[in-house]
Amino acid sequence: MDKVKVGIIGCGKISGIYMENCQKFEILDLAACADMDPDRAAEQAAKYGIPLVYTVEQLLEDPEIEIVINLTIPAAHAAITLRALEAGKHVYAEKPLTVTREEGLKVLEVAKTKELLVGSAPETFLGAGIQTALKLIEDGVIGRPVAATAFMLGRGHEHWHPDPEFYYAAGGGPMFDMGPYYLTALVQLLGPIRTVAGMTGKALEERTITSEKKAGQKIPVDTPTHVAGTLQFSSGAIATMITSFDVFGGSDLPPIEIYGTEGTLQVPDPNTFGGIVRYRKTGENEWREQALLPGYDQNTRGIGPADMAYAIRSGRPHRASGELAYHVLEAMWAFHDSSDSQRFYEMESTCVRPAPLPQGLEPYTLD
């Protein structure tokens, strides 16, 4: 199968793991990178052995590059993705797909018109942890899933992040920061979402940075920092979800649990590719730890673009699709909209539940 040439736009911190892993997948040829800061692009290219350092314009004009991996900041996702689509490129973006639903719908529309693929992180649901949990569900180990819980509870980022302001600005907060991991995992395990009921709040109107670079600086909190609610899936399953930057003393709640008619399944942190999968059948007192499926249990960011590349060559659907990413984006906004209106939010979008990864293939091959 012919390799697919890839170019990366955005050479910040997250780019390193993509650059490393894109060179492991046999389907990908990482040909170029670009950044608004030419020195940063040159530095990453030298570090990871990328042949070409381009401007954004040069990368989009290169006729050999088929997939653009968009690793810019979230506020730039829509603009860069649309430019790449207009240039005839397939696009895989870091999460979220876009910041607003209007931008997301525009991206999907242009991709459809141009007959191009678009996709988005998170791709962690393709890791061995969640894929193992998915197989247990599909094998009926816990019976029919009827309910779930999902918790992302922490104190926020001002104590460690050098530039934490955007986490507390409009469009930030715990749901838009970490919600994509949890919601994408839930859709992989339970299918698409039908209805959302949400409530939002914030513990503090102002936060003080304690990380070294800006220690002592005050940050206004302009977005909810505690988002709680309930989701009903098209399957009928009901999930309770909380994402919070207002849990200052820590928590021992599990990241995700799935409750079935014949048992309970503990799913690992969806921000990772591996982790521990456990289940307990009805009437049992002890958890059973399930060995992970052979696959990707380490940080394998880049598997999403690789899966897209196979889809381009074979014509099959890709798993981390634009439709999935938009469905998750709408669900995140749904929590906020439901809280603001004090009404249930009925989802307008849906998506196909991604197919499990095949087993028995050589490492870094997906088909």
Image: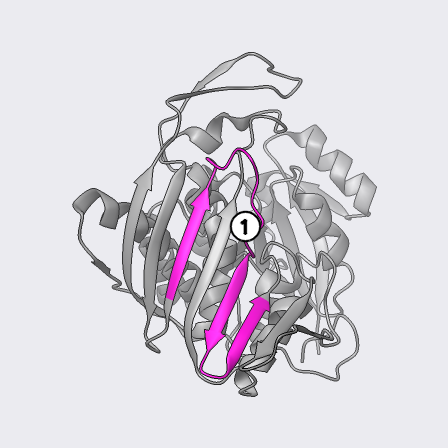
Q: Which residues are magenta?
A: 239-266
Where 238 sits versus 61, above or below? below
Foreground of the two, 25 or 254: 254
Q: Disc 1 marks which residue? A: 94
Residue 87 drawn at (x, y percent): 48, 54
Amino acid of disc 1: Glu
Q: Quadrant of residue 86?
A: bottom left
SS label for mark 1: loop
User: How far from the left and from the top, in percent, is residue 26?
Assistant: 76, 69
Q: Residue at x 58, y 49 (%)?
A: 252
Left/right of residue 211 with respect to residue 196 in the rendered view: right
Q: Is residue 241 magenta?
A: yes
Place residue 300 in its image quadrant: bottom right
Q: Is residue 45 above or below residue 4?
A: above
For image coordinates 35% across by 65% down, the residue present is 113
Indicate the position of residue 106 as horizontal and vertical percent values. 32, 54
- In front of the other: 283 or 50: 283
